[in-house]
Amino acid sequence: MKKFTVGYIALSKASWVTPEIDNIRKSTLESLKKLPFEIVHGNALTTTTAEASSLCSELTRKEISAVVVHFATFPVGAIIPVIARELNVPILLFSTPEQPAKGGIWAQNSFCGANMAVHTLRKMGKKYGFVFGPAIDANTLLKKPLSVLNCMSALASTKIGLVGGRVPGFYTSNCDEMRLRSSIGVEVEIIDQLEIVDTAGKLSDDEARKGVDEVRKSAASFCKTVEKDILPGGKMYQSLCKTATKYGLTSYAIRCWPEWSDIFGIAPCAAIGMMNNTGLISSCEGDVLGAVLMKMQASLSGGIPFFADLISFDYKKNTAVLWHCGAAPSALCRKFEDSKMRQHFRVDGGDKKGLVNEFPLKPGPVTLAQLDEDGSGYRMLIAKGTALDTEQIIRGNPLEVKFDCPVDKLVGTIMNDGYKHHYALVHADIENELIELCRWLNINPVRIQ
C-alpha cells in the first residue's frame, strides 16, 4: 500500500515577507512534523508562480498523497491555479488568526487569502478542505482532516477478494464493481471458493501447524466437539492469508454459506474473525460494500470494526442489539476469558459443524454506519452511541448499544428508506470524520440525530 505523504506549501507575497512571517512558516512546519505522516516541503515561503511550479514538480516527484497550502500571508492570486493544476491530489487550505502588528499593520491577511482561494478552486471544479487556527497547533488542527485524506488514499489502494460471490437471495450484497472502482477507488478480485480449498490442501505441515496455533490463541476455551475442527480451521485461515498475499488483497468479502461448510467441513466464521484481528478486514455473506465500510472505519479510528446485523431494539431504553453468528474478532471481546470456540448454532440444523468464536463485545463509545448504493451514487447511514456492558444473551456475538439519536427514528429511517440489513460498528467516535469522508467522495451522508 502506498505510503501517505503530505506536501506543505507556505504562501506569501514577496513584499510582505519578514522574519516574523517566515517564523510562522517554520512554526507550522515543526508542528506538522509531529503528525504520523511524512511531510515534504520547500525551505522558504513561496511567493511567485514560478516558485510554486518548481515546488509542485518536487512534490510530484516525491509522490505526495495530499497537500497543505498555508496562507502565511495573502498570496499572489495566480499561484492557486498553478497548485491546483500541477498537483492532482486533495488540497487542505490552512490559515491562521492574527492581531494588528506595530503601527496597525494587518501583516498577514491570512483568512482573506484562503477565502480568495476557495472561490478559485470552486471555479476550477476542485475539491478542498479548510482549517483555521494558530500555527503552533497545526498538527492538532490538521490531524483529523488529514486522517480523512489518508483514508481516501488507503481506499484507492484497497483490493477486496470476493470469494464465491454473494450468498443466495442477498441482493443487499450486490455491488457495481466499476462504480466502486471509479468513485471510491476500491478494486474487486473475484476468487473461487475451490481455490481456497485447493490452497488449504496443499499447505505444508509447518503452515498447517502455524494456522492451528493461531486458532488456539484466538479463544480462551474450546468445546470438546470442536477439537476435530481446529486443524481444518487452521488450514482455512492459512489458506485465506496465503491467497491474500498471492493476489495482493487488503480485504475479503466471503460467501460463507451455503456451500462452504459442505465443501470445507466447517464454517469460515472463526477464520473471518481471526483475519480482522490482524487487520485483514473481512466481511461475510459476500458483502463487498460492507468490507469497504469496514476499511473506512478501521482507517479513521485505528480500531477493528464489527460486521453485524441489527436484530432487536427497545424504544423505552433507546437501545438496540447488534449481532452476528460468531465471526467477531476476539480483540473486541468484553472479556477474553469469555470467548469460546463452538460449533455453529445454525449450520446443518445447529451444533454439528464448527467453527465460531462466541463472546459478547466490549463496551464503550461506538459509531454505527452502513454504506449503500443509491441510484447512481452512494449513501451512508451514520449513528453514534455507547456500547453497553453486554452479557452472552444469545449465541454468537451480541452487543447492546444505547444510541445518542432516538432509536425509533433510526429504525424508521432504515425501514422507510430501504437500507441494507448489514452494518459495521467501530469502538470510536468517528461521526464527523465519516461525514467529511462522504463530502470528499460524493457520498450522501444520512446522519441520524
Image: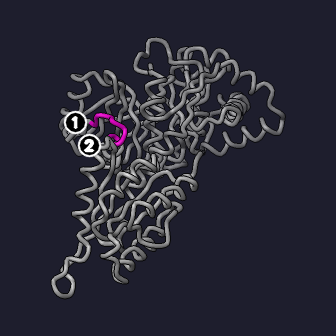
Mark 1: amino acid = Val
Q: Residue at 34% x, 55% y: name it.
A: 80
Residue 334, x across and y down, in percent: 46, 48
Q: Mark 2 points at which residue?
A: 403
Name the quadrant containing residue 238. top right
Report crowding for label 2: few under 14, some 14 to 19, many 20 or more residues within 10 A (C-alpha). many
Which quarter of the figure has residue 309? Answer: top left
Q: Residue furthest top?
A: 169
In magenta, the rendered stretch is 438-445
The correct choice, above or below, for 186 with respect to 179 in the image is below
Q: How many marks?
A: 2
Q: Residue 407 carries which label?
A: 1
- In the picture shown, does residue 315 fall above or below 61? above
Q: Position of residue 213 (x, y in %)?
A: 72, 43
In the image, what residue occupies the spot 32% across and 62% down?
Answer: 94
Q: Residue 325 at x, y = what percent?
A: 48, 29
Judged from the image, the secondary structure of the residue bearing numbered disc 1 is: helix
